[in-house]
Image: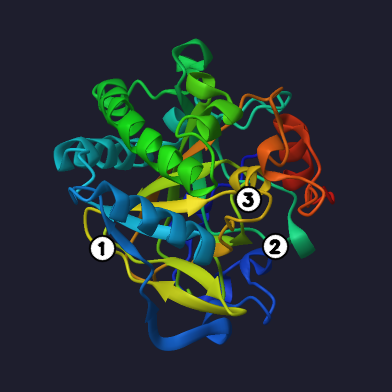
């Protein structure tokens, strides 16, 4: 049973000596050593309200090819809907531990939905300084409300409201990326499963740590989904790898952070790049983030789009069911 919670470890520790060794990263990963100091990475910022749709599309395509990460502003998701999502998620992690454990992952299930700490096979036995809650918010037929907290009482309403506003953002992003590949506007989304694509919400909870230079919230990784749409709280902590160096990413208030995931890289046959990123933690403040992973259904097969491969441009990736890809990814098995 996944019962070691970082929230409890953090509340019992107030000095470096008492940090359990399994949280201390190897020197090749420690952010205090491996972060480029004094430079914040200014990833592309795209104004979704720009009336020049051609320009917006070009910016999305360029950022997806060159960065794999960008921020969008003026995205039509009301700031109050984002605040409500953040408020109810924060309130969940402030509940008594016994109440949070009611939503714990089923240890006998292959699903990652629920409250927990460990997500993937740990390299060198090292743990991330993070607890989390996963649950699906779309499509309706896939939602399992057993993993939606009943407290605070407004949790469901806030998540449904935020989820409703996400669809327009997802459609605009995928349409632009599709056209940027030379496909029709709806082809990339349809290739991923259309309106049956899963929207999987995760809340990351990173409590304060007495030695943030030695630990990571989440170690370096690419997201395995199609795209990720993320909102953090006010505490900075996102880092991206650029030219084999780790940089802090400068977050713009009220922006949505977009990550290109593995499945888009595969579908585009490498034209778009999944972003290698990780998270650091704070000594003084609790960091939260709310990524929503847009992903295919488990049995849906993704490989390079047939229209993007030919004799001169052979497939660079295997085609496989998403559930098989995810299993390999989480268990550190080569694809």
Furthest residue to the front? 311
**Disc 2: CA contacts within 10 A as few (<14), some (14-19) or many (>=20):** some
> What residue is rendered at 59% in x and 80% in y?
243
Q: Quadrant of the N terminus?
A: top right
Instruction: Quickly name the residue at label 2.
Output: 126
* CA–CA distance in space, label 3 to label 1: 25 Å
Residue 143 as seen in the image, left or right of residue 124: left
Q: On the image, which quarter does residue 60 sit in? A: bottom left
* CA–CA distance in space, label 1 to label 2: 31 Å
- For marks 2 and 3, the one nearer the N-term is 2
Circles 1, 2 touching at the beta carbon (< 8 Å): no
> What residue is rendered at 65% in x and 72% in y?
25
| Residue in the foreground of this view, choosing between 177 and 250 | 177
Instruction: Quickly name the residue at label 3.
Output: 265
Q: Nearer the viewer, mark 3 or mark 1?
A: 3
| Residue in the foreground of this view, choosing between 59 and 169 | 59
Report if residue 222 is visible in the image. yes
> What residue is rendered at 33% in x and 38% in y?
169
Q: Secondary structure at mark 1?
A: loop
Check the image and report above or below for 28 versus 59.
Answer: below
Residue 163 as seen in the image, left or right of residue 174: left
> What residue is rendered at 48% in x and 49% in y?
180
Q: Which mark is residue 252?
A: 1
- For marks 1 and 2, the one nearer the N-term is 2
| Residue in the foreground of this view, choosing between 316 and 219 | 316
């Amino acid at each position: 049973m996944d019962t070691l919670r970082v929230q409890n470890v953090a509340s019992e520790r107030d000095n470096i000596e008492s940090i359990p060794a399994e949280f201390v990263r190897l020197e090749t990963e420690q952010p205090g050593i491996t972060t480029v100091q004094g430079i914040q990475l200014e990833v592309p910022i795209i104004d979704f309200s720009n009336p020049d749709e051609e320009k917006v599309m070009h910016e999305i395509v360029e950022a997806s090819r060159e960065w794999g990460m960008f921020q969008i502003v003026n995205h039509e998701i009301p700031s109050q809907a984002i605040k409500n999502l953040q408020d109810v998620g924060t309130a969940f992690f402030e509940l008594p531990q016994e109440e949070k454990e009611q939503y714990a992952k089923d240890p006998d299930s292959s699903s990652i939905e629920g409250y927990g700490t460990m997500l993937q096979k740990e390299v060198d036995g090292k743990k991330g300084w993070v607890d989390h809650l996963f649950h699906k918010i779309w499509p309706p037929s896939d939602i399992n409300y057993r993993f939606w907290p009943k407290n605070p009482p407004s949790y469901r309403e806030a998540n449904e409201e935020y989820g409703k506003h996400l669809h327009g953002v997802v459609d605009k992003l995928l349409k632009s990326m599709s056209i940027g590949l030379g496909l029709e506007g709806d082809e990339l989304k349809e290739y991923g499963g259309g309106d049956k694509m899963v929207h999987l919400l995760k809340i990351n909870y990173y409590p304060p740590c007495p030695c943030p230079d030695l630990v990571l919230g989440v170690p370096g990784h690419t997201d395995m989904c199609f795209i990720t749409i993320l909102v953090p709280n006010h505490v900075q902590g996102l880092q991206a790898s650029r030219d084999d160096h780790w940089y802090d990413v400068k977050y713009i208030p009220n922006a949505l952070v977009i990550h290109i995931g593995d499945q888009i890289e595969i579908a585009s046959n490498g034209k778009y790049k999944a972003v290698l990123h990780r998270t650091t933690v704070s000594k003084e403040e609790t960091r939260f983030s709310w990524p929503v992973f847009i992903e295919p259904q488990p049995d849906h097969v993704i490989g390079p789009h047939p229209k993007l491969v030919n004799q001169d441009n052979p497939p660079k990736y295997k085609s496989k069911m998403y559930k098989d890809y995810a299993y390999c990814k989480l268990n550190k098995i080569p694809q």
